[in-house]
Image (cartoon, grey):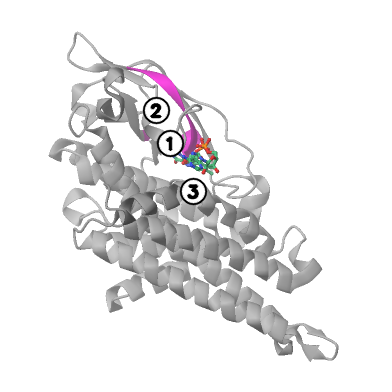
Amino acid sequence: MSPEQEAVYQAALEFARRELEPVAEAMDQDDQLPRAAWEQAAQLGYLGAGIPEADGGRGGDLASAALIGRALSRVSPAFALSYGAHVNLCAHNIWLSGSEAQRQRYLPELSSGAAVGALALTEPEAGSDATAITTQARRAASGGYVLTGSKTFITNAPIADLWVVYAKTNPEAGKHGITAFIVERGWPGVSTGPAFAKLGMRGSPTGEVFFDGVPVPAANRLGEENQGVVVMMRGLDRERAFYALSGVGIAEEALDRALGYAQRRRQFGRPLMEFELVAAKLADMYVETRAAELLALDALQRLDAGARASREAAAALLYAGRAARHAADEAVQIYGGAGYVRGSVVERLFRDAKLFDIGAGTKEIRRLILARELSGQR
Ligand SMILES: Cc1cc2nc3c(=O)[nH]c(=O)nc-3n(C[C@H](O)[C@H](O)[C@H](O)COP(=O)(O)OP(=O)(O)OC[C@H]3O[C@@H](n4cnc5c(N)ncnc54)[C@H](O)[C@@H]3O)c2cc1C
């Protein structure tokens, strides 16, 4: 981390400890995003992180925005997930692929928190096979499009004001017939379902979005027609690198808490830390957390330098997911019974960590991307 990035991270961690820690447990219990903390995050500029100030954002690079996510994730991975869907999946994609008019129209309201953002790619029959989506955008006589279909598992969907949506504009052309759009909640034919009850990441609302003959102006097409895969792939690399650092946040919080507990808790007349079987777990957790951090920062640095980083981003998220899950699992183990009860932070981290094996392309899909990259295919 550069000194500036370190400062961004430390400030975000202070915010998370002060504003999120008191509500993180209730967020998990009640399954509600704490709006007051969300608004405070907006006031601090976090909801426009990584967007240039000229476009209404807070400035900073992708790595800094991801470091804010890492800090939030230490305290509430669910809050960090919603933050990421808003800032990275929605705002960054509009900034990366949007026209000047789209940037001016949407980025200030996303950055100020006046609008909540999301990205809708996944469908009931198209998850890992993302280019098999069937949501359709047909050309209308007006010159715009008519959008029909549904999306599922969409982070922030129940509370979102706008979505980056992928749809087929030429279904016969497969992945070369996909186009991205920016769609607003208030438009006729747009509706959302209730938030799903989930294993973890509770309080980050996930749900369905329905498009029933929604008229979409041509001005809301994001990028060129039938070039949606370019928007998607560019965004997915950044999403994987971004969320890798959120996984790191879980791993380091699990490590810190487990270390503290191993030093405090005594059995057989000695602190747990003096048992080598326990100490070895902490040593492994440290190595995996640090390795995940370096992989993630490497991918982010490449992306911020304008380089292609599909391989590095897939590797970073693959490893960070594993590090987060393993660290949370070992933390529960070190806490023993105290780690298995509701209300213990490591128990919540354990449930939350599992998402990092599934979201932004499952761990299997990340391996497939890596294998393809390694064999020189693109
Ligand atoms: C909490 C949460 C938030 C999410 N947020 C968003 C969001 O904001 N926007 C969005 O668009 N989507 C979102 N998703 C969806 C997520 O991206 C998908 O769940 C994910 O891509 C997997 O798709 P699927 O669930 O349909 O599983 P499937 O694709 O049905 O996969 C099921 C299993 O089969 C495996 N599999 C599939 N194909 C292969 C293969 N070729 N080789 C080996 N194994 C394979 C998978 O790895 C997985 O283990 C979210 C999901 C969750 C749970």
Q: Determine whether the residue tagged by mark 1 lies in a helix, strand or loop.
A: loop
Sequence-earlier tag: 2 or 3: 2
Disc 1: residue Cβ within 8 A of ligand 1's nearest atom? no
View extreme (top): residue: 141
Q: Determine whether the residue tagged by mark 3 lies in a helix, strand or loop.
A: helix
Q: Left or right of 142: which side holds 351? A: right
Above or below 113: residue 348:
below
Q: Determine whether the residue tagged by mark 2 lies in a helix, strand or loop.
A: helix
Residue beneath the point at 20% across and 59% down: 307
Query: Do the numbered discs 3 and 1 sit on residues whose CB atoms are within 8 Å?
Result: no
Say how many tags the image has: 3
Residue 169 x/y as whole percent: 27, 21
| Residue tagged 3 | 364
| Residue tagged 1 | 160
Disc 3: residue Cβ within 8 A of ligand 1's nearest atom? yes
Residue 59 x/y as whole percent: 24, 59
View extreme (front): residue: 375
The answer to which image quadrant residue 370 occupies is bottom left
Viewer-nearest of discs 1 and 2: 2
Magenta stretch, main secondary structure class: strand
| Residue tagged 2 | 132
Q: What stretch is highlighted in magenta?
A: 147-162
Res 342 visible:
yes
Viewer-nearest of discs 3 and 1: 3
Residue beneath the point at 34% across and 47% down: 236
